[in-house]
Amino acid sequence: MTTSIGPSIGLVGAGGMGRSILRTLTAGGHTVTVADRDPQEAAAAAGEAGEGRASAGSLAEALAADIVVLAIWYPGTVELARAHGEVLRGTIVVDVANPLDATYTGLTVDPTTSAAEELARAVPGSRVVKAFNTLPSTTLAAGGVEGRRLDTFVASDDEGAKAQVMELLRTSGMRALDGGALASSRLLERLTAFTIELSQRYDTGSAYAFGFQPAADLAAQA
Ligand SMILES: NC(=O)c1ccc[n+]([C@@H]2O[C@H](COP(=O)([O-])OP(=O)(O)OC[C@H]3O[C@@H](n4cnc5c(N)ncnc54)[C@H](OP(=O)(O)O)[C@@H]3O)[C@@H](O)[C@H]2O)c1
């Protein structure tokens, strides 16, 4: 029998990013209920994840968790939140979406907002936290780039929710950096489009990660 740590986690979306998030969190010892529009995709994702810590569930089961990660595209995130707003009231909702346009180097949202803020507007009593979005799914699944731990930038207007998500990420082997208020998502989402532009110009494929490299040692904080 496996032991789990921390809050219950629900994951919606068993695509490329959902599976990488599932792998990361279960490797960190967390238990995750994963749901997808296609139950077979959810079952396959749960089967791939480590040590029996993931199980496939219905959307209702995933949304009932303490922390719900939405690994689906914007504006599907907003549509889901509108349809299940009351269930999500007071839940920590993690948004990983990049509202990329057809070129993947630009966004479909105006610079005065972000996918995360639009999601927050759709959830009553919102506790939306932005995380994971700057990392390509394959890099996240690999757990690092050339042995370097991955940085993920965490932004929220709810300090308690942000602290819980940062702890979840740290215990899953990532360096979680406090990215400030949810409005930082405007930058984090545009930054992702820019890193995709760089990856295209330098032909790196998705084998890269964006990181923060200060001279000071952040080990104590991150
Ligand atoms: N892929 C990356 O490298 C990457 C990196 C950073 C962030 N992200 C973000 O991660 C999110 C997911 O990307 P992805 O590449 O994993 O997409 P994906 O491969 O298309 O996976 C999304 C999965 O979620 C399912 N889904 C969508 N809406 C749903 C709903 N309401 N209920 C249940 N399941 C639902 C989809 O089913 P259907 O196919 O039937 O719609 C699909 O199986 C996006 O917001 C993207 O911006 C992706």
Image (spheres, rainbow, N blue to C red):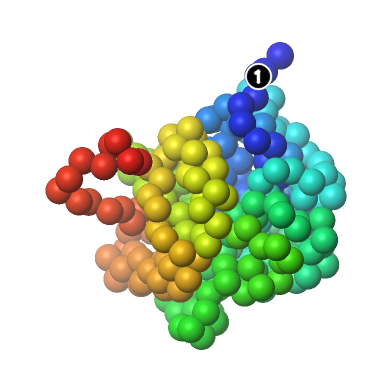
* Residue that appears at 73% across and 39% down: 33
Image quadrant of ligand 1 equals bottom right
User: Residue 104 location, x and y as percent?
Assistant: 47, 74
- Quadrant of the snapshot with the N terminus: top right
Question: What's under tag 1, amino acid-wise?
Answer: Thr
User: Residue 210 location, x and y as percent?
Assistant: 33, 56
Q: Residue furthest top?
A: 1
User: Residue 207 location, x and y as percent?
Assistant: 37, 52
178 vs 35, nearest the viewer: 178
Apparent side of residue 62 relative to residue 187 in the rendered image (left or right): right
* Residue that appears at 44% across and 37% down: 170
Apparent side of residue 203 relative to residue 136 in the rendered image (left or right): left
Instruction: Classify mark 1: residues with Cα within 10 Å, few (<14), some (14-19) or many (20+).
Output: few
* Residue that appears at 20% across and 41% down: 217
- Quadrant of the snapshot with the C terminus: top left
Quarter of the view holding residue 180? bottom left
Q: Which residue is mark 1?
A: 3
213 vs 15, nearest the viewer: 213
* Residue that appears at 55% across and 49% down: 160
154 vs 200, nearest the viewer: 154
